[in-house]
Structures are given as structure tokens and as C-alpha cells.
Amino acid sequence: MQHEEIIETKHKDFAHNWVSSSRFLWFCQIFLVVAFILGGCMGMYKHRYKGKPEVAIPENTLYNPQYK
């Protein structure tokens, strides 16, 4: 006589255990939100305003233009 052991894996399956699956999905959502926030902050830091540039303004376009 052959003895077969039936292993119950239903409690470990992602689709059948809603507690562990919802916890996993919640952690995935939190990770993605934090990743997008940090990515946005890094992008804004990389393209930040670096100060007032020195721009050459032609003298004939000033409020009081100076012509030659």
C-alpha cells in the first residue's frame, strides 16, 4: 500500500489568502508612492533655479533707449 501525503498549500497561495495579498499590495503601493515622490524631488533638484543669469541687454531696448 502506498501512502500519499497531501500538502495543503491553499493558505500560502496569493489568490486565496486575502490578508497576505492585501498586505503585499499595500506595501507595493507605499513603495511606489515613495519612489515617485523621491523621483520627483530629485528631478526638481536636478533642474532647480540656479540664480539670476547675466543677460546682455541691447541699449536700444532699454526704458530710456540710448542710440548711437
Image (spheres, rainbow, N blue to C red):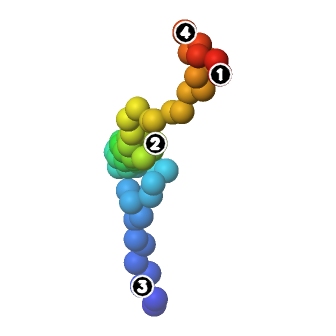
Residue type highlighted by circle 1 = Lys
User: In the image, residue 31 lies at what x, y percent?
Assistant: 37, 47
Q: Secondary structure at mark 3?
A: loop
What residue appears at the point 56 percent right and 27 percent down from the top-left corner?
Answer: 57
Residue 25 in sight here? no
Q: Which residue is mark 3?
A: 3
Residue 64's disc is: 4
Instruction: Pick whichever of labels 1 and 2 is earlier in the sequence.
Output: 2
Mark 3 → mark 4, Cα distance in angstroms: 102 Å
Instruction: Pick whichever of labels 2 and 4 is earlier in the sequence.
Output: 2
Q: Nearer the viewer, residue 59 or 4?
A: 59
What residue appears at the point 51 percent right and 33 percent down from the top-left corner?
Answer: 55
Instruction: Pick whichever of labels 3 and 4 is earlier in the sequence.
Output: 3
Residue type highlighted by circle 4 = Asn
Q: Nearer the viewer, residue 19 or 44?
A: 44
Q: Which residue is mark 1?
A: 68
Residue 47's disc is: 2
Which callout, 3 or 4, points to the residue nearer the camera? 4
Q: Secondary structure at mark 4?
A: loop
Mark 1 → mark 4, Cα distance in angstroms: 13 Å
What residue appears at the point 45 percent right and 90 percent down from the top-left corner?
Answer: 1
Q: Is residue 31 left or right of residue 62?
A: left
Q: Secondary structure at mark 2?
A: loop
Residue type highlighted by circle 2 = His
Q: Residues within 10 Å of mark 4 (few under 14, many from 20)?
A: few
User: In the image, residue 56 lies at what x, y percent?
Assistant: 54, 33
Residue 15's disc is: none
1 and 2 marks in contact (CB < 8 Å)? no
Residue type highlighted by circle 3 = His
